[in-house]
Amino acid sequence: MSQENQKIYIIAIGGAVMSSLAIALKKKGMTVSGSDDKIYDPAASLLKSHGLLPDEMGWDANRIDNSIDAVIVGMHAKADNPELLKAQELGIKIWSYPEFIRAQSDNKQRIVITGSHGKTTITGTIIHVLNYWNRNFDYVIGAKINGIDETIKLSDAPIIIIEGDEYFTSPLDPEPKFLKYDHHIALISGTAWDHINVYPTEKSYLEQFEKLADRTPKAGTLVYCTDDKQAKKIGNEDRNDVRKEPYETPKYKVKNGAFVINGDTSVKLFGKHNMQNIEGAKTILKRIGITDEQFYEAVASFEGAFKRNNLLAENNNTSVYTDFAHAPSKLAATAAALKELHPKRKLVACYELHTFSSLNKDFLANYKGTYKAPDEAIVFYDKNVVQEKNYESIAEDEIKAAFGRKDLVLFTDTEKLQSYLQTKSWEDQDLLFMSSGTFGGMDLAAFANKIV
């Protein structure tokens, strides 16, 4: 695809990934415009700073004409989107986001990082280490990484690192994104059933990772975590001329409030799951020329992904963290990590049921036993979200039974949650917020500074 003078229109330009793609394409010399019905910060401010924020919100078929070379459609758009229908009517080339990234990386070695958890941290670690050693590479990552301004880089580099998720490709294509990249090297960090709205059974979910592994080409490499039962099973299968690269959680210790690997390398990430993620990144990097010595020197300064294990406030005996954890396996790993970091402190954890899966009665049972680590476990869900999305209501006793904790504290009102937490003494106690939502619009940073 020629890079110069391409006129690209992005439907649903306001998403975190799509807005980053718009900026990356403009930097490549393309003429970029787009639309969305709602755009929030930080995407809105970023698009505005690059002259890419739409003048008006909403969809308008009149914006689509034959002067456009291609349309890229984001997941936020629906199949009956009027702009998408107009593009189809005019015969304009329509790309899904992953298909477009694949077309932009024809002549690159493509490395795809997948898994139900850890893929952002693994991808971010790889990016950080390669940047540290001034390597020439492109990347696509699904979240902001501390120290890295952009989430997408597209250039003439010979290699591209792609965070690939299992959610469907576009409103027109239900196949997982990670199957679109034609990887040379793929990593599976782990498999824990999610996205019940797309994969109604665990079997249908796991099949997607099996397809990914089976598509590894001859002379390709499949990296997988043997600490995850299903990832190990998928990775261990024999595939013609495919190199197997298993990895497991490395030996580590907690010393002076920090996690230490490789004997004496102190890292800024914490928790068993993150030590596992670091090992996955090291395994990939070794395949592309980074020595162990180089890796450990660079990884020590990696601060992690935005909204993952994010410290909001602390003093000598209390820390307040927030994390993007929004699924059973992530909840369990994140809570255990903070408990392991400060084993002498009590842990109060607040988890928001926010995603479609988490607010689905048929999925709730997957939380059984995942909330053991905290000394006090709190669950929050916003009744307004349940009503707005027309989800089936869930009774309090059903939630307690699903988590398997009789002492579970449940809130559906943000002000009551804040009042409850404010009345507590935080001496030698940590507080952890976990959600892909906002706890009903709660200003977590401001609240953390009130109690610490």
Image (cartoon, rainbow, N blue to C red):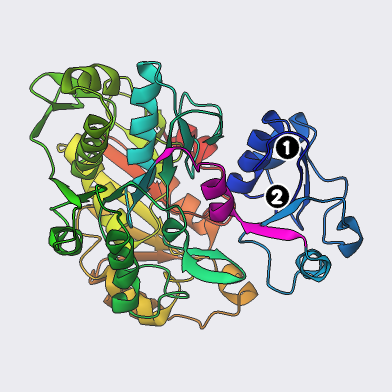
Q: Amino acid at mark 1?
A: Leu
Q: Residue 448 at x, y = what percent?
A: 46, 36
Query: What kind of element bears circle 2?
Result: loop
Q: Position of residue 283 (x, y in %)?
A: 21, 37
Residue 291 is left or right of residue 334, and the answer is left
Name the residue at 37% across, 17% down: 132
Q: Element under label 1?
A: helix
Residue at which label 1 appears:
47
Sooner in the amino-acid sequence: mark 2 or mark 1: 2
Tell which of 23 and 304 is nearer to you.
Answer: 23
Residue beneath the point at 72% across and 41% down: 44
For disc 2, the marked residue is: 13
Q: Residue 307: percent from the left, percent from the top?
A: 45, 40
Label 1: few (<14), some (14–19) or many (≥20) C-alpha neighbours in 10 Å? many
Q: Which mark is residue 272?
A: none
**Considering the image in quadrants, where does the C terminus appear?**
top left
Whether tag 2 and tag 1 are in contact, CB under 8 A, the answer is yes
| Left or right: 54, with 337 as reference point | right
The type of residue carrying mark 2 is Ile
Is 108 within the magenta? yes
Q: Position of residue 281 (x, y in %)?
A: 27, 36
- Left or right: 49 in relation to 249: right
For the record, the magenta segment spans 92-109
